[in-house]
Amino acid sequence: MTETKTYPCATCKLRAKYDNTPRSLAGRFWRWHIGFCPGWKAYYTHLPEAERNTLRERYGLKK
């Protein structure tokens, strides 16, 4: 039986704060944090290319 890995990044409360108010302290912390977070990198790389492109545009990520 194959299990699908779930990532808490999809429902992260700090990510939601960034989405609602990017200039808030919590939002800025989340944006800074994803620059080096191994969990975010794993989550991001497992997504289909179309979703990665959407996140890249929304959060200003590099390729």
Image: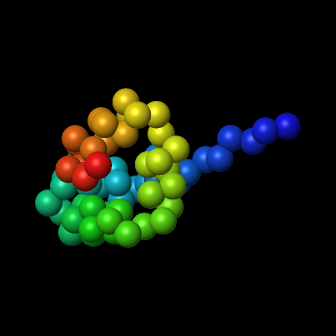
Residue at the far front: name it. Answer: 63
Residue at image location 61% in from the left, 47% down from the top: 6
Please indicate whether residue 38 sits to the left or right of residue 51 in the image. right
Let me know if residue 19 appears in the view.
Answer: no
Of residues 51 and 20, the one nearer the viewer is 51
Q: Position of residue 21 (x, y in %)?
A: 19, 53
Quadrant location, the N terminus: top right
Please indicate whether residue 42 sits to the left or right of residue 19 in the image. right
Res. 52 image quadrant? top left
Residue at image location 52% in from the left, 44% down from the top: 46
Residue at image location 65% in from the left, 47% down from the top: 5
Of residues 48 and 17, the one nearer the viewer is 48
Please indicate whether residue 45 sits to the left or right of residue 2 in the image. left
Q: Position of residue 59 (x, y in %)?
A: 24, 49
Residue at the far top: name it. Answer: 50
Res. 53 image quadrant? top left
